């Protein structure tokens, strides 16, 4: 059954990729800078059993949506800003996303201190350091040795030496013009809503959305002022369809919608997305020299959950890696991969036998198979505003 489902899904993805697309955005970006939460973060563990065959720094059994998008653009996977061990390369961009991050500034009870504003500040520090290294590495010999009289052959040799010195950084840091030509990607806001449900009413959460998006707008404006011109903004997915939220807030069947998802959470997601799209429209008018693209991830994921069997999946709402078994296989006391003593017995939250049958990985995040589907839908261009199609040379190089 699993192999048939996998074959069906691959054929479906091929058909999706070959569909005619829409209108204009240029995907020939030299680098990508990503901001967000665990939906696109590549630092904290856990597993990576499908693609990486080891813990990969992703909350997934394999690749994330951003990994598939980077692959489609023929760019390497992004290294995280916070991982500087073994001299990672940031030549083609950097990932500032961190698990648990919010758009609003972090508080004492926040899961992550790296809110959107902090990530933007880290980018500015990164950019400043790169510019400083580039400036020093390309200094002419005259700036170093002053007015000492030298023969022309010696000057030529020193110029060559400094050129080599500059080139040694090429594989580690972006070129100066990459910052303006790069794609700036954003997938953040889910945790602002999800965390709020533990202490606020639905009305309070809905009322806070303008404040959340004002903080996001300030970050975009700051990046624009620093030269960013290409913005790729994901809206948030259907929060109410995550096993974690169903287990906590969906015990009363009257609180669930026709898909079995928590209605209040999806209502908050929809309102945030509606106002985010309006903000993107505003930014498109405010910055006519920039490309601001809004991507409707909510609709893509909702369609996947509603029509999961059509795309080769068998479990739309049950976690692959968890504890407790059907219908959700999720227990908030023990996360994927952990072993704990519960009710006097030692238990382990294990991964399922075939994660390609599941939409959800660990109760909060999607499986590689689901991420692959979402990325393939993003690349059709029909879920983007403005839509795109005519400048997508990377489609011929898709490795799905």
Image (cartoon, rainbow, N blue to C red):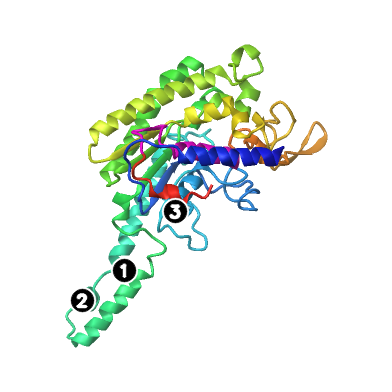
Q: Nearer the viewer, mark 3 or mark 2?
A: 3
Name the mark on residue 52.
Answer: none
Question: Are there few (<14), some (14-19), or many (20+) residues within 10 Å of tag 2?
Answer: few
Classify 282 as above or below 52: above
Vertical order, 349 against 134 (above or below): above
Give the residue drawn at x 67%, y 40%. Answer: 355
Determine which residue is flagged by label 3: 74
First of labels 2, 1 by sequence position:
1
Seen from this angle, which residue lies furthest top?
254
Left or right placement of residue 11 versus residue 165 in this view? right
Residue stretch in magenta: 367-388
Q: Which residue is mark 1?
A: 137
- Residue at 58% x, 26% y is 307
Observer able to see residue 39: no
Q: Nearer the viewer, residue 63 or 5?
A: 5
User: Quick check: 297 above or below 130?
Assistant: above
Left or right: residue 213 compared with residue 356: left
Under circle 2, the secondary element is: helix
For residue 64: magenta? no
Q: Is residue 382 magenta?
A: yes
Q: Residue at x 80, y 31 (%)?
A: 343
For the image shown, how many numbered marks are present on the structure?
3
Cα–Cα gap, marks 2 and 1:
13 Å
Quarter occupied by residue 140: bottom left
- Measured as percent of width and height from the top left, residue 113 is found at 48, 40
In the visual, does 62 lie left or right of 189? right
Provide the residue designation for mark 2: 142
Question: What SS does tag 1 mark?
Answer: helix
Q: Position of residue 16 (x, y in %)?
A: 49, 37
Badge 1: few (under 14), some or many (20 or more) residues near its Cα, within 10 Å?
Answer: some
Residue 318, x across and y down, in percent = 67, 30
Which is nearer the N-term, disc 1 or disc 3? Answer: 3
């Amino acid at each position: 059954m699993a192999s048939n489902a996998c074959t069906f899904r691959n054929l479906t993805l091929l058909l999706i990729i070959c569909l005619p697309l829409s209108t204009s955005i240029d995907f020939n970006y030299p680098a990508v800078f990503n901001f967000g939460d665990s939906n696109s973060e590549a630092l904290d563990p856990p597993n990576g059993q499908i693609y990486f065959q080891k813990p990969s720094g992703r909350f997934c059994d394999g690749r994330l949506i951003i990994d598939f998008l980077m692959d489609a653009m023929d760019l390497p996977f992004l290294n995280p800003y916070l991982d500087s061990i073994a001299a990672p390369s940031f030549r083609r961009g950097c990932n500032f996303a961190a698990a648990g991050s919010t758009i609003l500034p972090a508080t004492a009870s926040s899961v992550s201190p790296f809110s959107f504003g902090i990530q933007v500040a880290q980018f500015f520090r990164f950019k400043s350091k790169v510019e400083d290294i580039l400036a020093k590495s390309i200094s002419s010999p005259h700036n170093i040795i002053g007015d000492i009289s030298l023969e022309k052959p010696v000057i030529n040799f020193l110029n060559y030496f400094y050129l080599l010195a500059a080139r040694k950084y090429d594989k580690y840091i972006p070129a100066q013009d990459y910052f303006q030509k790069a794609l700036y990607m954003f997938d953040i806001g889910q945790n602002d809503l999800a965390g709020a449900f533990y202490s606020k009413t639905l009305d309070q959460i809905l009322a806070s959305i303008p404040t959340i998006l004002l903080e996001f707008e300030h970050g975009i404006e700051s990046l624009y002022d620093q030269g960013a011109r290409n913005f790729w903004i994901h809206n948030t997915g259907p929060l109410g369809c995550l096993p974690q939220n169903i287990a906590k807030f969906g015990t009363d069947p009257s609180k669930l919608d026709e898909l079995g998802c928590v209605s209040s959470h999806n209502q908050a997601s929809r309102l945030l997305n509606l106002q985010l799209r309006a903000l993107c429209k505003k930014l498109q008018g405010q910055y006519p020299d920039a490309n601001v693209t809004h991507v409707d991830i909510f609709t893509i994921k909702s369609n996947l959950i509603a029509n999961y069997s059509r795309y080769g999946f068998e479990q739309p709402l049950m976690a692959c890696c968890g504890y407790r078994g059907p219908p959700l296989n999720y227990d908030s006391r023990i996360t994927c991969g952990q072993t704990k003593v519960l009710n006097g017995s030692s238990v382990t939250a294990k991964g399922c036998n075939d994660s390609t049958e599941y939409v959800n990985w660990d109760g909060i995040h999607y499986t590689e198979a689901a991420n692959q589907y979402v990325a393939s839908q993003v690349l059709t261009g029909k879920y983007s505003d403005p839509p795109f199609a005519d400048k997508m040379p990377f489609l011929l190089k898709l490795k799905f």
